């Protein structure tokens, strides 16, 4: 028996206070830490961002470290943390060595990866000199690090797999190397593994447990409800107008803001437009086409508050550990519900009110069905992605409390606040907008054209005389057609045509469903709740009308 085990360890709560300065555990932390430390049990921590996940593996590491009393600085066992991004590792290691390390101690945490400049760090790490060793999956898997730990008989208390959803092949943040982390279990069959992620999707969680080969893990699952997020969905206008709106909003409520766009090109355009509205010094771009230098500059300036706005593709994501992001805007929807939830989750980690605005058009979702977006996926993955796209599409167009819809999409029980959060766009809509209206005349026109020969919008449009129904322009009729499809009067089937460049293009082919046929045959009025797209166009009509009146 060594001297270390003879000295009784201080209770976990003592280490929590001594090292981290926290008076107590947050909900779930104690259970997660105890399962790992006392039972050597696998643990899966599924909490929303900001929930305090990192403490669940940092505390066990420091606790073991402090239990060594009287020995030279050498941990009683280390915790190996796998993390997908160097910047994320560097931030955490820096923070630990700056605040958790005690005066006079050497560094208690280090990171290993291709960008670690100091060769001594590796040998000190495998000798067990650090309580926490952060490592990229590549480093862990391919440089014999695991073998070395075994040869040197370094005691590994646990492996912590941070951002564990990166293991999921069809998720937005997939990392190839993560897929092989199941090897840890094979090489270290008796070492507990802790998986951590903020993903809300039950499918992804199940995937994590399976791929990491977790054995009956203690599953810590919190609510993903984020009461401080004010969620809104709007129809997507042209870029210049959206930029104008975003800028006006920003002037009213300034604060760190992330604007997501679907492509690099849109990022460039949006950044330029916002730059000219708000001054280029406020705005930076971030996408995979920029140099490392440009990207880390944008990242750094944003994190430190020197710029307020980053316009980015999905590439800007993990590692944005900034508590006071006041606004996450999507100019165009992300591909999946999972990605959406992950991205809006970056807003308001400090618990203060924050805005999330999603701008979309039906066509955006239809485009996601084309080969370009799903190439390289297996049939099952493709199906999972498409189902998730559909979920987000339904969420976007259904006029039901957004927060309620989000929770329901991830199978949570009914929230304590009922079915209306009171802060989202739907809850804040004046109720008169939501009542049914009579659309009999334009609906009959559309359905009769589809009845005579079901087809694509371009064909239907040609068969309608301009002004056939007073006050109904083609764009408005199109929005009504989408409503008829959503309400089950009209079938909308997505069809693919092969283009010359080899890609498939997708369009929607309409047909009459039994409800539509019945509506045509009877004298029943067609009553529908207007979609927000139609409401938008009506608002424009009204504005144009007033303007004419003024002139
Ligand atoms: P996550 O990784 O789940 O996004 P973090 O681990 O970054 O969350 O924790 C979020 C914040 O909560 C951090 O500022 C952290 O210091 C703080 N925190 C974590 N646990 C506690 C605790 N028990 N008491 C007080 N603050 C805590
Ligand atoms: Zn609501």
Image (cartoon, rainbow, N blue to C red):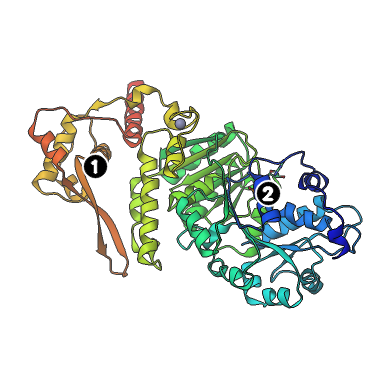
Quick one: quadrant of the C terminus?
Answer: top left
Tell me if residue 171 can be seen. Answer: yes
Q: Which residue is mark 2?
A: 303
Residue drawn where x is 83% and y is 55% of the image: 66
Confirm or reject: label 2 Cβ below 8 Å from ligand 1: no
Query: Label 2 to label 1, Cα distance in Å?
Result: 44 Å
Q: Secondary structure at mark 2?
A: helix
Quadrant hosting residue 437: top left
Residue drawn where x is 81% and y is 45% of the image: 14
State left or right for residue 464 relative to residue 30.
left
Location of residue 412 in the rendering, given as x and y in whole percent from the top left corner? 46, 41
User: What numbered label is drawn on residue 485?
Assistant: 1
In the image, is residue 508 above or below residue 170? above
State left or right for residue 546 relative to residue 519.
right
In front of the other: 185 or 521: 185
Q: Nearer the viewer, mark 2 or mark 1?
A: 1
Location of residue 483 in the rendering, given as x and y in whole percent from the top left corner? 26, 38
Specify which label sits upstream in the sequence, 2 or 1: 2
State left or right for residue 542 relative to residue 355.
left
Tell me if residue 54 can be seen. Answer: no
In the image, is residue 387 above or below residue 479? below
């Amino acid at each position: 028996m060594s001297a270390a085990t003879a000295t009784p360890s201080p209770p976990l709560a003592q280490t929590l206070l001594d090292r981290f300065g926290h008076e107590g555990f947050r909900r779930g932390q104690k259970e997660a830490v105890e399962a790992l430390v006392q039972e050597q049990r696998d643990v899966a921590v599924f909490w929303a961002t900001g929930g305090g996940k990192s403490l669940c593996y940092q505390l066990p590491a420091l606790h073991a470290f402090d239990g060594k009393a009287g020995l030279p600085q050498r941990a009683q066992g280390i915790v190996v943390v796998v993390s997908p991004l160097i910047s994320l590792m560097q931030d955490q290691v820096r923070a630990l060595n700056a605040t958790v390390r005690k005066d006079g101690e050497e560094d208690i945490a280090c990171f290993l990866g291709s960008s670690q400049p100091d060769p001594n760090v590796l040998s000190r790490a495998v000798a067990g000199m650090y309580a926490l060793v952060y490592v990229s999956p590549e480093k862990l898997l391919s440089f014999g690090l695991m073998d070395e730990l075994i040869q040197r008989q370094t005691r590994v208390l646990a492996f912590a797999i941070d951002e564990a959803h990166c293991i999921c092949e069809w998720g937005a943040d997939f990392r190839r190397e993560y897929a092989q982390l199941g090897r840890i279990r094979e090489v270290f069959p008796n070492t507990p593994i802790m998986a951590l992620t903020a993903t809300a999707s039950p499918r992804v969680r199940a995937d994590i447990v399976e791929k990491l080969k977790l054995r009956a893990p203690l599953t810590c699952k919190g609510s993903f409800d984020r009461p401080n997020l004010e969620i809104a969905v709007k129809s997507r206008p042209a870029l210049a107008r959206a930029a104008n709106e975003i800028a006006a909003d920003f002037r009213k409520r300034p604060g760190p803001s992330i604007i997501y766009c679907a492509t690099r090109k849109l990022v460039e355009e949006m950044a330029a437009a916002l730059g000219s509205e708000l001054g280029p010094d406020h705005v930076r771009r971030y996408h995979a086409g920029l140099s490392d230098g440009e990207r880390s500059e944008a990242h750094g300036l944003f994190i430190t508050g020197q710029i307020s706005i980053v316009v980015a593709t999905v590439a800007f994501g993990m590692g944005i550990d900034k508590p006071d992001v006041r606004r996450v805007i999507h100019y165009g929807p992300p591909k999946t519900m999972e990605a959406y939830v992950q991205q809006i989750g970056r807003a308001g980690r400090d618990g203060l009110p924050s805005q999330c605005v999603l701008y979309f058009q039906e066509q955006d979702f239809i485009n996601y069905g084309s080969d370009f977006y799903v190439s390289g996926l297996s049939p099952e993955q493709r199906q999972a992605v498409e189902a998730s796209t559909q979920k987000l599409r339904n969420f976007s167009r259904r006029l039901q409390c957004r927060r309620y819809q989000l929770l329901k999409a991830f199978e949570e029980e009914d929230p304590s606040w009922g079915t209306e959060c009171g802060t989202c766009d739907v809850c804040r809509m004046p109720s008169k907008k939501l009542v049914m209206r009579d659309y009999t005349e334009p609906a009959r026109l559309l359905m009769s054209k589809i009845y005579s020969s079901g087809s694509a919008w371009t064909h239907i449009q040609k068969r309608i005389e301009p002004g056939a129904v007073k006050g109904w322009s083609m764009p408005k009729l199109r929005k009504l057609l989408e409503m008829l499809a959503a309400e089950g009067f009209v079938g909308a089937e997505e069809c693919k045509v092969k283009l010359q460049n080899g890609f498939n293009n997708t369009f929607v082919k309409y047909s009459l469903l039994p409800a539509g046929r019945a509506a045509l045959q009877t004298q029943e009025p067609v009553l529908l709740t207007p979609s927000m797209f139609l409401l938008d166009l009506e608002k424009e009509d009204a504005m144009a009308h007033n303007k004419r009146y003024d002139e």
